[in-house]
Image (cartoon, rainbow, N blue to C red):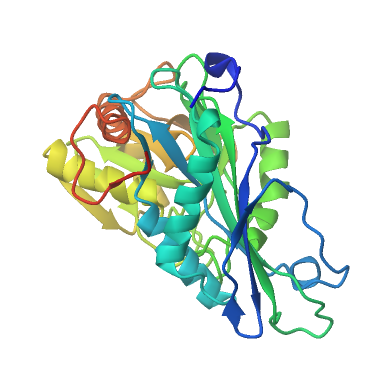
Amino acid sequence: MEKKNIDWENIGFGYIKTEKRYVSNYKEGAWDGGVLTEDDTVVISECAGVLQYAQTIFEGLKAYTTDDGHIVTFRPDLNAERMEASATRLEMPAFPKERFLDAIDQVVRANEAYVPPYGSGATLYIRPYMFGSNPVIGVKPADEYQFRVFTTPVGPYFKGGAKPLTIRVSDFDRAAPHGTGHIKAGLNYAMSLHAIVSAHKEGFDENMYLDPGTRTKVEETGGANFLFVTKDGKVVTPKSDSILPSITRRSLMHVAKEYLGLEVEEREVLFEEVKDMAECGLCGTAAVISPVGKIVDHGKEICIPSGMEQMGPITQKLYDTLTGIQMGRIEAPEGWIRVIK
């Protein structure tokens, strides 16, 4: 299929409408068959559950053109499983895993002309989401839901290379103890908006959230997990019940151990330890790894030894290896790559 006339190497990380999206509705206890449609509008009641009580969840993943010309997605089964966990927590009906994977395949194939070519640095971002659609005025779960998937081509998250970020320790909590921090619910991201806007106004790129119970342990940012490298080369990520289980982070930890032969550890990370780390990064779907160069704790600066010019050496190896797997340059572990075309 002929590609769209898009300047692939210069598109940003924003929304570009594509031709098809997938829609399935849940009513009277069952999901319908689902359809592909050109209609990008959503029409719901003014009293819909999503509007009144924020009953909405979502996922994010990408489709890539590999070195050998295939179009693939990266570990979409884990997105399906995480969305099911999110639905369970918010009393929403799970969208079946096999149907989730099929919906992703259908939408990517239908928008093949928008999948950026290999080597452009761009990808096709895929957004599955679900929301309560029928009128709900009492505080209770909705009875009807809509599951949708749309796509949009996006450029690299960092143009000209990933420069290390300056982040601050936030006075806000991202999630409550025993709350919803471990699921991908829209309400969590709404909670983070004021914190990120105020961080940007003060000249910071992101927030570091500490655990809401004791505020002594590192959790995550508004949209990414932390990854640290110790001075003796160990790769460490924080462990907490209120951290979103990032698919990118889990993949990087596997890469660190199985591809790079590094020692890895998922454990509680005390904020007091951060000053002794050699490298720090934020990991997620959008950028894979965003290096952190400086952390500011109410005026006190913690400068990461890897500096403010480039990724640390181990972070760079992790980034290069995982992106090499995603793009087909490096052999992937079994089941990680789903070939769509």
When the figure is inspected, residue 140 is found, relative to residue 265, above or below; the finding is: below
Say which of 341 and 8 sits in front.
341
- Rendering coords of residue 187 (x, y %): 66, 62
Name which quarter of the figure residue 15 lies in.
top right
In the displayed orientation, state which residue is furthest to the left. Answer: 261
In the displayed orientation, state which residue is furthest to the right. Answer: 46
Name which quarter of the figure residue 320 lies in.
top left
Say which of 288 and 227 sits in front.
288
When the figure is inspected, residue 67 is found, relative to residue 186, above or below; the finding is: above
Residue at image point 72% right, 67% down: 54
Residue 262 seen in this snapshot = no
Say which of 13 and 314 sits in front.
13
> Number of callouts in the render?
0
Name which quarter of the figure residue 53 lies in.
bottom right
- Rendering coords of residue 92 (x, y %): 59, 76
Residue at image point 40% right, 64% down: 98
Residue at image point 68% right, 33% down: 200
When the figure is inspected, residue 337 is found, relative to residue 155, above or below; the finding is: below
- Rendering coords of residue 331 (x, y %): 18, 35
From the viewer's perspective, is 116 left or right of 135?
left
- Rendering coords of residue 223 (x, y %): 54, 47
From the viewer's perspective, is 154 left or right of 78?
right
Residue 28 seen in this snapshot = yes
From the viewer's perspective, is 303 left or right of 93?
left
Classify the position of the C terminus by image quarter.
top left
